[in-house]
Image (cartoon, rainbow, N blue to C red):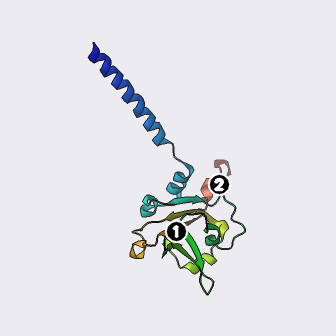
Amino acid sequence: MKKILLITALFTIGFSTGAQVNLSKSSKSHKEILNEQYASGMFKNAEGIIIDVENEHVQGYLNILDWLNGRVAGLQIYISRIGTRVPVIRGSVASIFVDELRMDLSYLNLLSVNDIAMIKVIKGPFAGAIGNGGGGTIAIYTIKAVDEEDEESPSQIP
């Protein structure tokens, strides 16, 4: 009788614990959803700090690196003699990717901060960058356009 009670108790405890774990895994944070929506491949799987830029007040900045300065631990933004902002993570120059394409630092002067949806700062080495991105990587994602088909309702289609 004691064995049956013990087995029943262990089964009940194990079942309730398993249910709690499954419930916690199914709910994702807003930043995890953004990462799945925008990032792909190596960028999605890389550990990093995700910043939801769409819900931040960035309108007063001309370069996203100016806004990013001081918001991520270990990231510093320096300005070169020619006025280009240089992101440095833990003493090394970081690689810049916009929509997962490697970009020159001067490109960020052309990119409107209002067009940016998410930034992922990868502090460690990143295999997708030239030389494994030993200085870290800043991945910038622009706002995705909504498909015209999604905007039209079935009643508007002839």
Counting labels gives 2
Q: Is residue 142 above or below residue 14?
A: below
Q: What residue is drawn where x is 53% and y is 79%? A: 104
**Of 156 and 56, the residue lying toward us:** 56
Q: Amino acid at mark 2?
A: Glu
**Of 25 and 142, the residue lying toward us:** 25
Task: Characterize the local packing of mark 2: few (<14), some (14-19) or many (20 or more) Cα atoms within 10 angstroms.
Answer: few
Quadrant of the snapshot with the N terminus: top left
Task: Characterize the local packing of mark 1: few (<14), some (14-19) or many (20 or more) Cα atoms within 10 angstroms.
Answer: many
User: Does 6 sit left or right of 137 as displayed?
Assistant: left
Q: Position of residue 132 (x, y in %)?
A: 39, 72
Q: Residue furthest bottom?
A: 82
Which residue was labeled with disc 2?
151
Q: Position of residue 11 (x, y in %)?
A: 34, 25
**Of 89 and 99, the residue lying toward us:** 89
Q: What secondary structure is found at the residue carrying circle 2?
A: helix
Q: Earlier in the sequence, mark 2 or mark 1?
A: 1
Q: Position of residue 146 (x, y in %)?
A: 61, 59
Q: Position of residue 144 (x, y in %)?
A: 59, 62
Q: Amino acid at mark 1?
A: Ile
Q: Which mark is residue 138?
A: 1
**Of 156 and 74, the residue lying toward us:** 74
Q: What residue is drawn where x is 49% and y is 72%? A: 101
Q: Is residue 117 above or below residue 88?
A: above
User: Does 136 sit left or right of 116 as displayed?
Assistant: left
